[in-house]
Image (cartoon, helix red, strand yellow):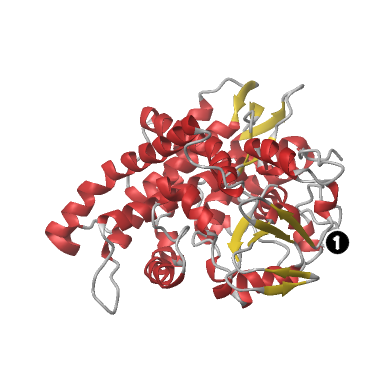
Amino acid sequence: MPCPVKPKPLQSKASLLSIFFKKQHSWLDGLYERSYSMKMGQVNMPGLDLYMVNQLDLVRRVLIDDVEHFPKHEMLHDIMGPLLGESIFTTNGPQWRRQRNLLDPVFDLHRVQHVFSLMRAASQAMEARLNAVEHGSEIDVDSEMTFVTADIIFRTILSVSLDSSEARKILDAFVIFQQESPKIALRRMFRLPHWLVWRRSARRWRHAGEQIRAALAKVIRPRYDAFHAGGADALPGDDILDAILATVREDTGQGFSFEEILDQVAMLFLAGHETSASALTWSLYLLALHPEIQERAGADVERVLGDAEPELGALKQLSFVRDIFREALRLYPPVGFLARECTHATQMRDKRLAAGSTIVISPWLIHRHREYWVNPDDFDPERFTREKPLRDAFLPFGTGPRVCIGVTFAMQEAVLILACLLRRYRFVLVPGFTPKPVGRLTIRSENGMLLKLEHRER
């Protein structure tokens, strides 16, 4: 069976100079062969001491058991600040706990189910776009997955469908933000002064974040003002922004300020469209690479849904489709690297970590680790029913207290979109095209994802 594409690892550990130039392009480019079997590695940079931790009990210690001593790295705040501000993605300590406690009820199971009809409407709009594509045409499914997941976020959070011209501005700005972010991070890692290098990159990066926030603020501001003018009566009660507006702290009776809401919605936009778009794009690539699995999944969808509109109860029967998405998440986890800061001197294996050291836990490496998975580079959706993954070896959404707040939302969205696509279309590899995985904020294909779209006979 064909093996899914991945960047060719280096034969030996890269030098600091090589890391400096390679990782400006992609975080994946500095990995070497032993990265996929080691338990812990170390890189000493001018600006920080970095430890790559793959050993599962240490992963659990950092992300679950001793999480208070390993907060999110402040560098994440530096990189993501122009886009996400003070959101739960970037904050730590009491500020993060207050925000998380306020937001958790917004993403409980009832609320996610409540917005299902809005998800379905966006999926139906996607089908209408693809129905207009001629049978056998080549399309960039990366662009389509990016659009439909952004549309779902706009509909479910803001009750606004995504206009194509406005979408292009936002999505183009996010591409720029992605491209420039590794350069900003490396400047910090190598302790280079802000004024010395990448001044144009820094301007493009900051402007892109501001563009996205401005587009979101334009939709949020009227709703925020109406709520504070009219109270709860101003809320139609249909979307996630309504729930955020109505959320208050028990101790003060105060809700989120406008800037706090903008920060959280920007975070939800990033987490809800960018990560889902990445995983769905790779899912379609893997299905095109393995047509026999695609046909089996299509038959399952046809059996369960037929010509009926997708309903939540029916989607729950599509366990094979769900496992396809989980396997795509394993091979191409949207967030490939999780950075934490060590707040106190500690021991890990044979290494003494000083306070302030950087710990990186990599779902990309752990999901492909030679010791934790059988044939780790193969696409095998049935592994999730045939063999139980090792505890803590599958973490596409993170784990522990800081597990992604939108896990249920993302899984519901993914199964819905894949079901709609598999029922109507077949995806076929384009001869000569090979995707190029790059790791930036998320793991995407640098050259898009060109596939042939065939309409199924019905």
The residue sitting at 61% across, 68% down in the picture is 342
Residue 24: image quadrant is: top right
Q: Residue furthest left?
A: 229
Can residue 238 be seen here?
A: no
In the rendered image, the quadrant that contains the C terminus is top right
Which of the pair 84/164 is nearer the observer? 84
Q: Secondary structure at mark 1?
A: loop
In the rendered image, the quadrant that contains the N terminus is top right
Q: Is residue 289 above or below residue 345?
A: above
Q: Residues within 10 Å of mark 1 (few under 14, many from 20)?
A: some
Can residue 220 be seen here?
A: yes
The picture places residue 210, in percent across and down from the top left corner, at 36, 40
248 sits left or right of 401 in the view = left
Q: Is residue 218 above or below residue 36?
A: above
Which of the pair 390/318 is nearer the observer? 390
Q: Which residue is mark 1?
A: 371
The picture places residue 340, in percent across and down from the top left corner, at 59, 62
The picture places residue 171, in percent across and down from the top left corner, at 46, 34
Q: Specify the amino acid type for callout 1.
A: Glu
227 sits left or right of 215 in the view = left
The residue sitting at 44% across, 62% down in the picture is 91
The residue sitting at 81% across, 42% down in the picture is 9
Which of the pair 322/96 is nearer the observer? 96
Which of the pair 124/277 is nearer the observer? 277
The picture places residue 82, in percent across and down from the top left corner, at 41, 45
Q: Is residue 387 above or below residue 412?
A: below
88 sits left or right of 423 in the view = left
Residue 436: image quadrant is: top right
Question: How many numbered callouts?
Answer: 1
